[in-house]
Image: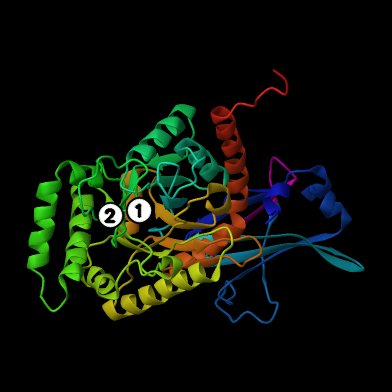
Amino acid sequence: MYFYEFWQLNRRLVPVGRTTDMTLKARYEQRQISGLRRQGNLILQCVSNDGVLLNGENAPWDGYDPVVWQVGEADPDTLCWQITPPSEGEYHYQLILEQPERRDIIAEWSLYALQDDLLPLIPLRGDMHIHTSWSECGNRNEDPRYVAAWARKRGLDFVAITDHAQREPSLLAAEFIRNTGSSFRIYPGEETHQLMEKQPTLFCRNRFLPYNHIVGFGARDGVIKWANEHFDEYWQDIEARAAALPDHHPRSIRLAMAGADWLIDKIHEFGGLAIFCHPFWRPCNRHNLPAPVREYILQQNKFDAMEVIGLCSATHNHAEIEGNRLAVAWWQQQSIRRGSMIPLVGNTDSHATRAMIGRHYTLVFAESNTLPSIQSAIRAGRSVACIRFPKYPLDIFGDFRLVSYAYFLEREYFPEHDAHCAAEGERLLAELQPASPLHG
């Protein structure tokens, strides 16, 4: 984790089957290569995490391949070697100083070899389900811009603020970030619901919202704003959809089914990604989503991704852990039945920024940090869902290939990335909240 505080490596990702030149240099003079060579014999060795040596032989217990190295022509403090990885995966290195009476590991690090489809993609951490003071259930102190700054501080590369039935808070936060010049991105978002009656205002309202919760990520207009402004047309459509469904379910269930279809269709019409969120949420022992509606949404297969990790809280409580694990098990079962992986995401559904942001997230492998690229990557299944709580092991769910790569990134890349994000987040908070004078 601390390797990159003391050493400079020219790259961490290499292509499978092609030779790559590698260099290593100490950041401080105490570990300079020339000084180490005067103390004893330097040995560089490598083994793949697949347990196979570079020549294809079985790696014995604690067995490594010796690596031929040399010092740089222009810099005797640069260690140079080559790698030609035969397969995708992680390659672990040790730099050893051998002396007459002792043998010390000076540095350890890993590289990751990738096939050409993944190699050029950027790993981006994001959260696409976040609430602010604009939601009735949100923290009344948390302005959308404040939430955005904290999200960057916690190591996220993009977020969508998704207040209930409102797209406007995400636009407010996006404008703030855009004016700071940060590479962090805020994309339009909204948690959509089925309106049962026309509302005088959607601001800070969510108590009236029934079963369906579908997150719209990146829609170019407000879905519930449209429904409220065209309520008669919207409700006639819901009624017609419900009437066309088989009548072996009660009308209330059929209306919820029709509502789910309408929300997802409208999100798509407005260019958004439709996320089927917290399918096993049961707040305060009340049922949020009836099982027949949950199964209907799954079978219709209109949504773009399933939120298998959500329901985050400060206490990491058992009810929310259970809801997430049920969602993961359901996702696994249904993916196996389909014969292909259902695209998945991980979000916080945050209602308290400091306690929640950054604890759950989606790791997306995209061509760029742009809305079309992220939407495309998630639809294509190039995302994993992550849980990261202090004092708990990191959990990552998704396609095995991406999960393996993600664990490497969390160890070898993101600690340095997070230090940069934390500093930038502090700057964003300072711009938003200048310090008050002690007197006056």
Magenta region, residue range: 71-83
Taking the image as shown, residue 41 lies to the left or right of residue 135, namely right
Name the foreground residue: 99 vs 174. 174
**x, y percentage for residue 174?**
40, 35
Residue named by callout 2: 193
Q: Is residue 428 visible?
A: yes
Residue at 35% over, 79% down: 333
- Residue 157 sits above or below residue 389 on the image: above
Crowdedness near tag 2: few (<14), some (14–19) or many (≥20) residues, C-alpha within 10 Å? many
**x, y percentage for residue 197?**
20, 51
Residue named by callout 1: 207
Crowdedness near tag 1: few (<14), some (14–19) or many (≥20) residues, C-alpha within 10 Å? few
Total marks shown come to: 2
Residue at 39% over, 34% down: 172
Circle nearer the N terminus (2, 1): 2
Distance from Cα at disc 2 to Cα at disc 1: 11 Å
Secondary element at image label 2: loop
Name the foreground residue: 411 vs 307. 307
Q: Amino acid at mark 2?
A: His
Does the magenta run of residues contain 345? no
Does the magenta run of residues contain 81? yes
Q: Is residue 25 visible?
A: no
The quadrant of the rendering that contains the N terminus is: bottom right
Q: Amino acid at mark 1?
A: Arg
Q: Nearer the viewer, mark 2 or mark 1?
A: 1
**x, y percentage for residue 349?**
44, 55
